[in-house]
Amino acid sequence: MQRRYLASGDRMVLVEFPEEISQEVNSQVHEMAAVVETTRIPGVAEWVPAYRTLGIVYNPMETSFRSLIESLEQIEGLGGQAQAGRSRRIEIPVSYGGEMGPDLDFVAQHNQLTTDEVIRLHTASEYLVYLLGFTPGFPYLGGMAPEIAAPRLAEPRSHVPAGSVAIGGSQTGIYPIESPGGWRIIGRTPLKLFDLSRNSPFLLKAGDSVRFRSITLEEFQRFEQLTE
């Protein structure tokens, strides 16, 4: 797959993949990120995968822009081996509608569906975590059924509870922390997507697969009590 290496400031190489948002392109991004992690190229400090780019931050005192590109070109094609077995499948329990999902009715009406049909379609898909962004641990998930797409709010809410599951356009995501937000909230999960007390603060990682499972409000409350 064609890729371009561009300078982004004085200490980052931006690797560009084909100009499209797709699972195939995003998988190539994560495969290259896995290779960068396992090969430990001298001078590389960190890397940030996105939809169709991989930002690689390096120390210019340890390597140069040209030397880093040469190293990256040498490891092209190793992605499949490095990425094998790294993708995880995570199930996310969600209490849909009511106080947990104040916009579920809107999403249903907008798409001429019942709320049960929206829930069925939302839980039927397997989603790919394209990237984490916006707030710590916020997953941008691809693979949502187009039948439940919905426009963002004209005016974002100033307060969205942590764990809120929402739809923005043709994507779905989960608010990991309390924050402002403009996506349509259809439910909430009791799982903590971002927790600094854990060795790995983020529940989800870019490249993971996610499925949602509908639970009752009572199940949500019991789960929340167990995790307090």
Image (cartoon, grey):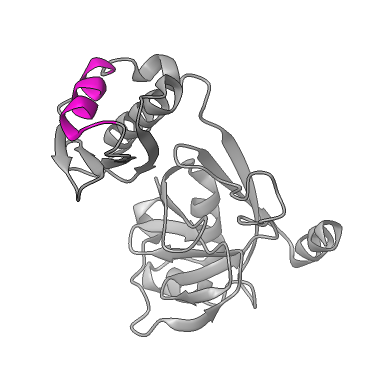
Residue 81, given in percent of the width and then of the height, sits at 41, 14
Look at the image and say whether residue 99 sits in the magenta stretch: no
Seen in the image, is 71 located left or right of residue 162? left
* Magenta extent: 63-75
Q: In the image, 18: left or right of 187?
A: left
Q: Tell me the chief SS of the magenta region.
A: helix
Q: In this image, 1 relative to 171: left or right?
A: left
For the residue pair 184 and 115, the one nearer the viewer reads as: 184
**In the picture, residue 110 is in which quadrant?**
bottom left
Query: In which quadrant of the rendered image does the C terminus lie?
Result: bottom right
User: Which residue is nearer to you in this view: 72 or 184?
Assistant: 72
Q: Residue at x 52, y 45 (%)?
A: 124
In this rendering, the count of numbered labels is: 0
Identified at 56% across, 44% down, the residue is 211
Task: Please state which of residues 98 and 142 is positioned toward the viewer in this rendering.
Answer: 142
Residue 152 x %, y %:
35, 73
Q: Is residue 71 located in the magenta-colored stretch of the structure?
A: yes
Quarter-of-image position of residue 51: top left
Q: Nearer the viewer, residue 153 or 62?
A: 62
